[in-house]
Image (cartoon, helix red, strand yellow):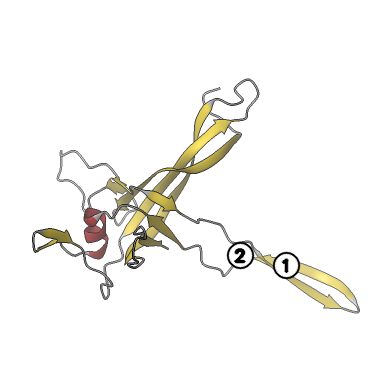
Amino acid sequence: MAGSYKSVAAGNQQAWLGFLDSNGFLLGGDTSAPSSGAAGSGMLRINGIKTAPIATPERELVQVTGDDGLIAEFDFESLTSRGFVIEVAVQNLTLEAKLLGVPVDSIGGGLMSYNDVVDPAELDVCLILQSRSKKQDSGVVGKKAWSGVYIPLATAQPLGRNGFDERGAAVYRLDVT
């Protein structure tokens, strides 16, 4: 068996973001396609991932009652957003600049990013999130494996640092829709 169909998983091992062109093809870490014959770029790593609370919303159940009983039942696609906010421990100025369409500025000898940019470009991206797991298939129980989620089409916007507090660790946020 080449892969594993059953596994248990834990943690956030790695996350990657890549830009898509207008046809939905993966460009990699650059927002534009390479020139003819040139090699493309790899996806951008989202370093220091802490949380990525992805979840598919439950479908909405509508019951139609009458005559003191259930007459019919319908289920509809949820109107709840599938968006979520990724939290990371490592600020990636290159990724932020590309997503916001702004440069990384050098101010006083330090590199800085922009925050709360009005009307940033909405670039199509795809994401790969992976974690460690252990196989649970017959004959390979406990063997090392990877578990992951592939999000083929989304937009992402940096939300900046969660704030400054005395000795608290900084957390940088990335909104995924």
Q: Which residue, given by chain and number where applicable, does mark 2 sit on?
A: 77
Say if 124 sits above or below 16 in the image: below
- Residue 169 shows in this picture: yes
Q: Is residue 8 left or right of residue 127?
A: right
Task: Pick the quarter of the image with the C terminus.
Answer: bottom left
Q: Which residue, given by chain and number where applicable, does mark 1 sit on?
A: 74
Secondary structure beneath dot 2 equals loop
Q: Is residue 15 left or right of residue 96?
A: right
Name the one closer to the observer, 159 or 151. 159
The crowding category of the residue bearing disc 2, from other C-alpha atoms within 10 Å (few below 14, some 14 to 19, many at least 20), is: few
Marks 1 and 2: CB-CB under 8 Å? no
- Residue 31 shows in this picture: no
Cα distance between the residues tagged 1 and 2? 10 Å
Residue in the image at 22% along x and 56% along y: 93
Residue in the image at 62% along x and 30% along y: 136
Q: Amino acid at mark 2?
A: Glu
